C-alpha cells in the first residue's frame, strides 16, 4: 500500500533564504561610509568669537584649537601648553596631512597668544591656518 502523505512530503522542496550575501553587502556599505566620513574633533570649550563682516565659512576644518578668555589653549577636549601646540599639530597632521587648522580665540583672549598659536601651527607644517570669527547678526 502506498502512503500518500509520505509521497507528498518527499516532493516538497525546502526553501531557504541565504542571508550571507546580504550581510557581506551591509559590511561593505559600512566600510564605505566609515572611509568617506570626516570626523570633526571639537576643542572642548565654549568660546565667544568676535564677529567680522568679511568672515567666510570654511567647510574643511579638521584641526581645531581653542583659546579661552583666560588665554588657556585647548585641543581635543584637553588643555595644552603653548609650547606643546607644535607637537600636537604635527601629530594631527600626521593622521590627516590635508587637514586645515582653525584657531578659535575668545573675544577677551590676548592677541599675542593667538599669534603664537598660529605661528606654532605653521612651524608644525600646517599650510592652511585660519582664525575663526563669527558672522554678524542678521547675516
Image (tube, rainbow, N blue to C red):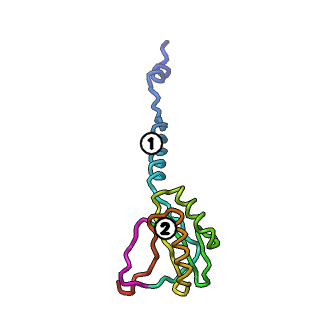
Looking at the image, which is closer to me, 12 or 67?
Answer: 67
Looking at the image, which is closer to me, 68 or 21?
Answer: 68
Looking at the image, which is closer to me, 109 or 14?
Answer: 109
Q: Is residue 108 magenta?
A: no
Identify the disc placed on residue 101. Answer: 2
Which residue, given by chain and number where applicable, does mark 1 sit on?
25
Seen in the image, is 13 located left or right of residue 54? right
Q: Residues under labels 1 and 2: Cα distance?
A: 36 Å
Give the crowd class for mark 1: few <14, some 14-19, many >=20 residues within 10 Å. few
Tell me which residue sits at (56%, 71%) in the image: 43
The chief SS type of the magenta part is loop
Looking at the image, which is closer to me, 56 or 82?
Answer: 82
SS type, badge 1: helix
From the top left corner, tell me how far across and down residue 46 is, in percent: 55, 79
SS type, badge 2: strand
From the top left corner, tell me how far across and down residue 109 is, in percent: 56, 84
Please determine whether, in this image, residue 121 is positioned above or below residue 29.
below
Give the crowd class for mark 2: few <14, some 14-19, many >=20 residues within 10 Å. many
What is the quadrant of residue 76 in the picture? bottom right
From the top left corner, tell me how far across and down residue 136 is, in percent: 39, 85
Tell me which residue sits at (54%, 80%) in the image: 47
Tell me which residue sits at (46%, 44%) in the image: 28
Please determine whether, in this image, residue 90 is positioned above or below residue 5.
below
From the top left corner, tell me how far across and down residue 82 is, in percent: 62, 73
Q: Which residues are magenta?
A: 51-60
Tell me which residue sits at (60%, 81%) in the image: 71
Identify the disc placed on residue 79. Answer: none
Q: Quarter of the image for the C terminus: give it.
A: bottom left
Seen in the image, is 128 located left or right of residue 85? left
Amino acid at each position: 500500500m502506498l502512503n500518500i502523505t509520505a509521497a507528498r512530503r518527499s516532493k516538497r522542496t525546502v526553501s531557504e533564504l541565504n542571508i550571507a550575501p546580504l550581510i557581506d553587502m551591509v559590511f561593505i556599505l559600512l566600510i564605505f561610509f566609515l572611509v568617506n566620513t570626516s570626523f570633526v574633533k571639537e576643542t572642548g570649550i565654549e568660546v565667544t568669537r568676535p564677529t567680522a563682516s568679511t568672515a567666510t565659512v570654511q567647510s574643511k576644518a579638521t584641526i581645531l584649537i581653542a583659546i579661552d578668555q583666560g588665554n588657556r589653549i585647548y585641543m581635543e577636549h584637553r588643555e595644552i601648553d603653548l609650547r606643546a601646540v607644535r607637537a600636537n599639530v604635527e601629530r594631527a597632521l600626521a593622521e590627516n596631512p590635508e587637514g586645515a587648522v582653525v584657531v578659535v580665540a575668545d573675544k577677551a583672549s590676548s592677541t599675542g597668544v593667538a599669534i603664537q598659536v598660529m605661528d606654532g601651527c605653521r612651524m608644525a607644517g600646517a599650510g592652511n591656518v585660519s582664525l575663526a570669527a563669527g558672522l554678524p547678526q542678521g547675516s
